[in-house]
């Protein structure tokens, strides 16, 4: 459970730095299909195909492809859509450069832009694009420990050539990829955790020093007040002696009169 939570945190932290762009170069609200390098982007939870197209989750059939031959060109993490490999972006159908664009499958690996015509497959004036045999390799926004969908569960369309499908990824490769992500996450997370720990210890040490300094100041003030109080008491005693034995004249009794003074 802890390992899964850590991997989820790691995937989210990587997603923060992944931005999807429309062909116009504006930021799209699509999410990347994959977090390794440049990748196609589709709407959240939609299927990502190896030919760079997307399938709306409402129209997905058992093999992960579209039930009505309707796909769409999503966004891309590369603003110029210049990518290659299984995570490639689809550079076709840019009639709506500020957003996604509908794409129809015409059979024999050919596709056309729905923006040209609602029946662009049968319209000879509509341009056709060969995008190869598609298979699902990921769900947009799903970055768990094994977000990729094995291609063995994807069945090509009846008119597609099975030889054109991508080679399935082995379980061992997925495990190695997961382990490498875990190691990278540890390499990033541990130093940050240690830095936070050192910061907390430093703050506690500083607060302790401040408390010690405050106690010393209070002790000095207490001693100074005590000394001042003693001095005041000494002055009060001296004043009392002065008033009672020095300032007041001494009255002499008749027996104490000098006889020479009487004569």
Image (cartoon, rainbow, N blue to C red):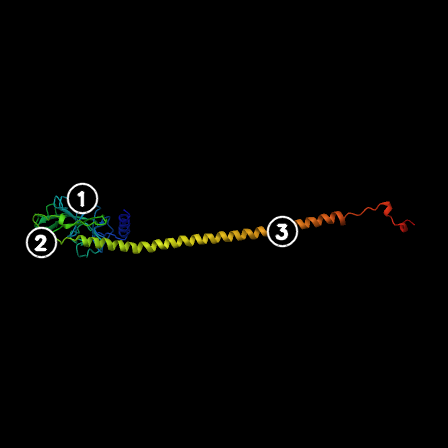
Query: x, y (%) of residue 191?
Result: 33, 56
Gap between marks 2 and 3, in whole Å?
A: 101 Å
Query: x, y (%) of residue 258?
Result: 88, 50
> Residue at (10%, 54%) from the top-left corner?
164
Numbered label attached to residue 57? 1
| First in residue order: circle 1 vs circle 3 | 1
SS state under label 2: helix
SS state under label 3: helix
Query: x, y (%) of residue 259?
Result: 90, 49
Q: Which residue is mark 3?
A: 228
SS state under label 1: helix
Give the camera-side residue of 253 and 23.
253
Circles 2 and 3, Cβ within 8 Å, touching? The answer is no
Numbered label attached to residue 163? 2
Gap between marks 1 and 3, in whole Å?
A: 86 Å
Q: Is residue 243 left or right of residue 193?
A: right
Residue at the right extreme of this rendering: 263
| First in residue order: circle 2 vs circle 1 | 1
């Amino acid at each position: 459970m802890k390992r899964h939570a850590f991997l989820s945190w790691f995937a989210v932290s990587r997603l923060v730095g992944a931005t999807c762009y429309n062909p116009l170069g504006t930021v799209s609200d699509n999410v990347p299909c994959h977090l390794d390098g440049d990748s196609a982007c589709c709407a959240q939870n939609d299927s990502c195909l190896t030919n760079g197209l997307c399938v709306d989750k409402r129209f997905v059939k058992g093999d992960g492809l579209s039930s009505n031959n309707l796909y769409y060109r999503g966004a891309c993490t590369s603003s110029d859509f210049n990518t290659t490999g299984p995570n490639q972006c689809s550079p076709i159908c840019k009639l709506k450069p500020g957003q996604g664009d509908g794409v129809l499958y015409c059979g024999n690996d050919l596709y056309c832009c729905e923006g040209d015509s609602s029946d662009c497959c049968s319209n000879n004036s509509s341009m056709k694009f060969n995008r190869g045999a598609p298979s699902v390799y990921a769900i947009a926004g799903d970055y768990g420990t094994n977000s990729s969908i094995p291609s063995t569960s994807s069945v090509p369309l009846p008119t597609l050539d099975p030889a054109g499908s991508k080679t399935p990824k082995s379980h061992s490769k997925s495990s190695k990829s997961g382990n490498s992500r875990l190691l990278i996450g540890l390499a990033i997370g541990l130093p940050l955790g240690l830095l936070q720990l050192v910061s907390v210890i430093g703050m506690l040490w500083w607060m302790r020093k401040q408390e010690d300094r405050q106690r010393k100041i209070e002790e000095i003030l207490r001693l100074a007040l005590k000394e001042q109080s003693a001095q005041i008491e000494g002055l009060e005693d001296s004043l009392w002696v002065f008033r009672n034995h020095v300032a007041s004249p001494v009255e002499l009794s008749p027996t104490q009169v000098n006889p020479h003074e009487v004569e």
